[in-house]
Image (spheres, rainbow, N blue to C red):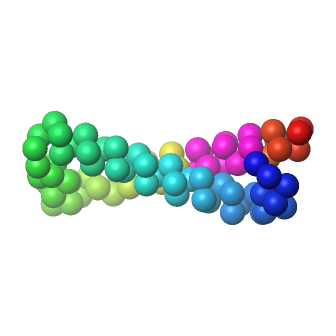
Amino acid sequence: MSKHNIREPFWKTALRLGIFFIIVVLLIELIWELLSSGNLNAIRSSFDDGTWINYAISRLIIGIVYGLTMAYYLRKNAKRK
């Protein structure tokens, strides 16, 4: 982490890392579903029965926690150097 990133607000770093993590996790899950079943019908059925809301909320919470944790450790390591 450069000195420029130390001056960047903590919440921006956390938001950027959290969004990146969510996108990576979603892509991995999408590829996994496609390879395991050969189609994406599970995604369509989750929209039909409403389970996508719990899925989206859990991924959002995981992304926030990951972003905050990584931003904290990156800032801590950058200050130490």
Q: Given the current orientation, which residue lies at the most extreme right position?
A: 80
Q: For residue 35, which quarter of the picture?
A: top left
* Between 54 and 14, the one nearer to me in the picture: 14
Quarter of the picture holding the C terminus: top right
Can the viewer see residue 80?
yes
Percent of width and height locating residue 34:
18, 45
Query: Between residues 3 and 61, which one lies in front from this camera angle?
Result: 3
Q: Answer with left or right where residue 53 lies relative to residue 47.
A: right
Q: Nearer the viewer, residue 20 or 15?
A: 20
Q: Is residue 53 left or right of residue 23?
A: left
Percent from the top left, x then y, of residue 43? Answer: 20, 54
Q: Is residue 12 left or right of residue 19?
A: right
Which residue is painted at 69% across and 63% down in the image? 12
Q: Position of residue 32 (x, y in %)?
A: 25, 40
Residue 58 in the image: above or below residue 8: above
Query: From where the camera sits, is residue 6 visible?
Result: no
Q: Is residue 72 magenta?
A: yes
Q: Is residue 24 magenta?
A: no
Q: Which residue is rendered at x = 60% and y = 53% of the image?
A: 17
> Number of labelled discs?
0
| Residue at the image point whose x is 60% and y is 59% from the top | 16
Q: Residue at x 85, y 55 (%)?
A: 3
Q: Quadrant of residue 31?
A: top left
Find the magenta span and give its range. Answer: 64-74
Predominant SS along the magenta part: helix
| Whole-percent x, y for residue 13 in the image | 69, 57
